[in-house]
Image (cartoon, rainbow, N blue to C red):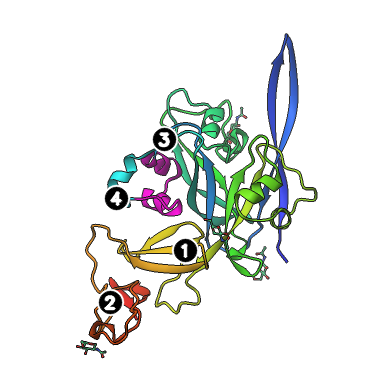
Amino acid sequence: MRNYMQFLNPQILCFLFFSALLLCLVETKSTIEPCNSSNSCPSLLSYLLPWDSKLSEIATRFNVNFFDILASNSLFPITPSSAHQILSAKSQVKIPISCSCVDGIRRSMSTIYTVHAADTLASISEGYGGLVSAEQIKIVNAINATNPLTYRGTLVIPLPCTCFDNVNNGGNAIYMSYVVQRRESLGSIATKFGTTVSDLETVNGFGEATVDPGDILSIPIAACSSATLNWYDESMIVPNGSYTLTATNCIKCTCEPTDITLQCVPSGLDVPCYNLRCKGSNLIIGDQCVDLSQTACNVSQCVYRGHRGGKILSR
Ligand SMILES: *[C@@H]1O[C@H](CO)[C@@H](O)[C@H](O)[C@H]1NC(C)=O
Ligand SMILES: *[C@@H]1O[C@H](CO)[C@@H](O)[C@H](O)[C@H]1NC(C)=O
Ligand SMILES: *[C@@H]1O[C@H](CO)[C@@H](O)[C@H](O)[C@H]1NC(C)=O
Ligand SMILES: *[C@@H]1O[C@H](CO)[C@@H](O)[C@H](O)[C@H]1NC(C)=O
């Protein structure tokens, strides 16, 4: 049985209509996961770019390595110059984050934002694509009249995060926090991410099948796990449609969409890599041998087995 709760986050929006000031209270839903361990776990954010941004800017905004953003979005080439690649406004970018357990709920608190001139709580919230509200930033950072935003001051940006033990319907999964947009329904979101309305309802604990713009849903994404691969000293979970770099960036493991299995091959990155060839064979990691009568083929395949102390293991 999955534990879930919803909490309501009141945001006050003001509408100026003719000369009347109408105050209205808009409540947005978001899914929170209770927790009681100090372990952190992997999760994703779905970030709708509010404006054109370089990959390096997105990486800085969320305090993550841009290689990890490339990997989560299956972007290529994997080179340092990709940091200058510009993604256009309204692109949806997956950001890998780690959830910690803060005050009994799963959260990401590792994003630190440095205040720019002319920033307001609202503009900072907009910069994060609605993943965090102005009110949440205000509360977490105790911003008030005597403790205002200060130029070059730093803020902790609390971001939604769920792991649900990284399982869904008995399979491996990574959960992605997603901000509902105008004209979207649970049905359209389920279709967009290859899941079902009933699965979204179960994960998010929604009593009724309606969502409103600004609500934050947790979306299960099937994932590849190394748990059954018998690796030494290493484990990873990679969401469908992405890859991850490991063994000091020497190895790239992709979660294959067809059968949700990890396929690991040399990354081809310009880094020193040793032991990419299987012992007693001409095959390198990721190779398969079709003709076993060939001398190079005294092993039929060469598969990645993890890494340890700078050594890449294979079999
Ligand atoms: C809290 O810990 C107990 C025992 O370790 C476990 O059974 C329970 O599921 C945990 N609750 C949550 C919300 O993680
Ligand atoms: C602002 O917050 C600080 C620290 O939390 C508190 O000491 C102070 O009383 C608050 N000021 C106002 C005007 O609420
Ligand atoms: C993995 O993603 C692909 C699209 O990239 C999709 O067609 C496939 O159904 C997904 N697999 C699972 C198990 O969700
Ligand atoms: C594999 O084949 C090569 C070339 O014939 C040979 O040198 C090597 O000893 C063989 N290794 C094993 C483990 O049989």
For the residue with label 1, is its CB less than 8 Å from the closest atom of ligand 3?
yes
Query: Which residues, given as a range, are shown in magenta?
Result: 55-76
Q: Which residue matches tag 4?
A: 79
Earlier residue among tags 3 and 2 = 3
Disc 2 marks a residue whose amino acid type is Leu
Quadrant position of ligand 1 = bottom right
On screen, 225 above or below 68?
A: below
Can you tell which of label 4 and label 2 is closer to the viewer?
A: 2
Earlier residue among tags 1 and 4 = 4
Q: Position of residue 25 (x, y in %)?
A: 74, 30
Q: Position of residue 137 (x, y in %)?
A: 57, 37
For the N terminus, the image quarter is bottom right
Verify CB contact (< 8 Å) between mark 4 and mark 2. Answer: no
Q: Main secondary structure of the magenta part?
A: helix
For the C terminus, the image quarter is bottom left
Q: Position of residue 52 (x, y in %)?
A: 43, 32
Disc 1/disc 4 C-alpha distance (Å): 20 Å
On screen, 295 above or below 78?
A: below
Q: Which mark is residue 255?
A: 1
Few, some or many residues within 10 Å of mark 4 (<14, 14–19, 20+): few
Magenta-span inclusion, residue 147:
no
Earlier residue among tags 3 and 4 = 3
